[in-house]
Amino acid sequence: MKNRERDKRDWEMLQEEIRSCRLCQERFGFEPNPIVWGSADSKIMQISQAPSKRVHETRIPFNDLSGQKLRREWYEITDEQFYDVRNFYIVSVGHCYPGKNASGGDRMPPALCARTWLDREIRLVNNEIYLLVGGAAAKFFFPTRSFTGLVFENLELRGKPAYVLPHPSPLNIKWFRDNPDFLAYRLKEIRQIIHQTLNLPE
Ligand code: SF4
C-alpha cells in the first residue's frame, strides 16, 4: 500500500514534468503542447501515435472524427466513459503534435519522447490492460512483429494483457479492405474485453 501511495505521488510529479517538457521545440519549430490525460489508477492505458493538430489546439485527446469512431462505434462507450480518467489513460508514443512533413502529413513522433516519458508512465500507472492503437504504437513495443499479425493476437505487455487496434482513420481504407476479419469478429472480442474491464453491462 505504501509503495502504491509513493507511485501515485511520483505519477503526479511526472505529469507536471511532462506538461512542462519543451525538448522538441527546436525540432518542431513551434512550442510543444504535451497532452496528458488519465489518472494513476485508470483501468485501461490506450497508447497511440501522437496528437493531431486539432488535439494540439484543444488539449483534448482523440477530439476528432477518428476519436468519435473509436469510442462510439468501436468501443461502444459514451464520450463521458471515454474521458473518465478512472477508465482511460490516453497517451501516445509522442505526447505532442509533431507538425507536418514535406508531403503535408503529420511527422512521425520523436523517438526520444517515449524513451523519456512513456516508460515512466507505464511503470507508475496501475492499469489492467493496454490498447495499442495504430502502427507506431505497435512497432514501439513489438518492433520485429508484423502489424496485422499483432492485431489478431492476444498479447502481453509488461505482464498485462495487451491488444492492438488499427488506427480508425478513414485514410486506412486499404487495411480494412484487406483484413475484413477485423470488423467481422476481432473488434467484437476486443470490445468485450474493454467492457469487462470497465465493468459495463453486457
Ligand atoms: S514530444 Fe515529448 S519529448 Fe518532445 S516536447 Fe513533447 S513531451 Fe517533450
Image (cartoon, helix red, strand yellow):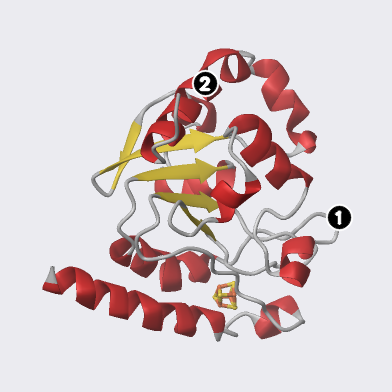
Residue tagged 2? 188
Answer yes or no: is residue 145 visible.
no
Tell me the residue at 69%/85% (across/down): 26
Q: What crowding class fits label 1: few (fewer than 14 Cα within 10 Å), some (14-19), or many (20 or more)? A: few
Dot 2 alpha-carbon crowd within 10 angstroms: few under 14, some 14 to 19, many 20 or more: some
Percent across and percent down for residue 119 are 36, 64
- Location of residue 110 by image quarter: bottom right
Q: Going 55% across and 81% down the picture, which residue do you hit?
A: 19
User: Label 2 is placed on what type of residue?
Assistant: Lys
Q: Quadrant of residue 97?
A: bottom right
The answer to whether residue 178 is left or right of residue 7 is right
Select label 1 or label 2 by which is in front: 2
| Picture residue at 49% right of the left edge, 45% below the top | 139
Res 60 visible: yes
C-alpha distance separating marks 1 and 2: 35 Å
- Residue topped by disc 1: 103
